[in-house]
Image: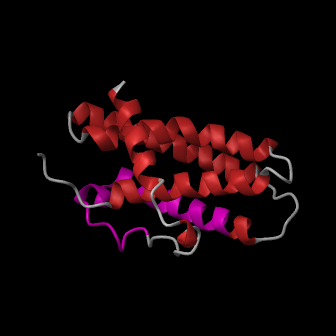
Amino acid sequence: MSCDMALAGWIWLASFSDPGQIGAAPPIPPMAAAANPLAREPLFAEIVRRAGSLEARVDALRRAASPAPDVAELRAEGLALADLDLKGHLDLARRGTDGDLKCILKGISQDLPRLLNDLAQASPAQRPAALDELFYLLRDNVEVITAPPKAAV
């Protein structure tokens, strides 16, 4: 339950972005923005690298005029990323640390396969929205790991 609340909070906060800026910012350079020491650990660095790479590819698809992008390779890589996110969740759970990140990674590991399926099944009219949702989830995947840790209150 607490993981669901943390993920809902993260999505709620992300929804307050300026609509005029949607899609305007370039992808975050994966390790350049890594103020969180956790992002330098091999598992989490790999999650950031893969999510950043997929985010850039999805962004290119969003901007392309392709009527039907081939999503088979994207889907395979996305499912592998979802597995890594779940491993990150389990790693943090074993450590007993960072409850919010642990929960958010679990949520991403569950949402990513669903969004990839939505994209694969999207009609041409639904495709832009499906690509946008996938893009923002991948961006969140990078940002949640690279964000500086917050002091406990």
Q: Nearer the viewer, residue 9 or 148?
A: 9
Image side of residue 134 versus residue 94, left or right: right
Residue at (50, 39) in percent of width and height: 109
Between 89 and 126, the one lying in front of the other is: 126
Please tell me in which quadrant of the rendered image residue 79 appears: top right
Could you tell whether 37 is left or right of 46 in the image? left
Residue 24 place in picture, x, y as percent:
56, 75
User: Quadrant of the image for the C terminus?
Assistant: top left
Question: What is the quadrant of the N terminus in the image?
Answer: top left
Question: Which one is in front, 105 or 3?
Answer: 3
Q: What residue is shown at x 62% (from left), y 52% (from top)?
A: 134
The x and y percentages for residue 53 are 56, 64
149 relative position to 152: left or right: right
Depicted 3 relative to depicted 26: above or below: above
Give percent across and percent down for residue 23: 59, 69
> Which residue: 43% across, 39% down?
8
Residue 146 lies, in percent from the top left, at 34, 61
The residue stretch that appears in magenta: 30-59
On whether residue 6 falls in the magenta region, the answer is no
In the rendered image, the vertical position of residue 61 relative to residue 100, given as above or below: below
Left-right relation of 116 to 51: right
Residue 40, relative to residue 44: is it above or below?
below
Task: Please say if 20 is above or below 3.
Answer: below
Check the image and tell me how it is coloured: secondary structure
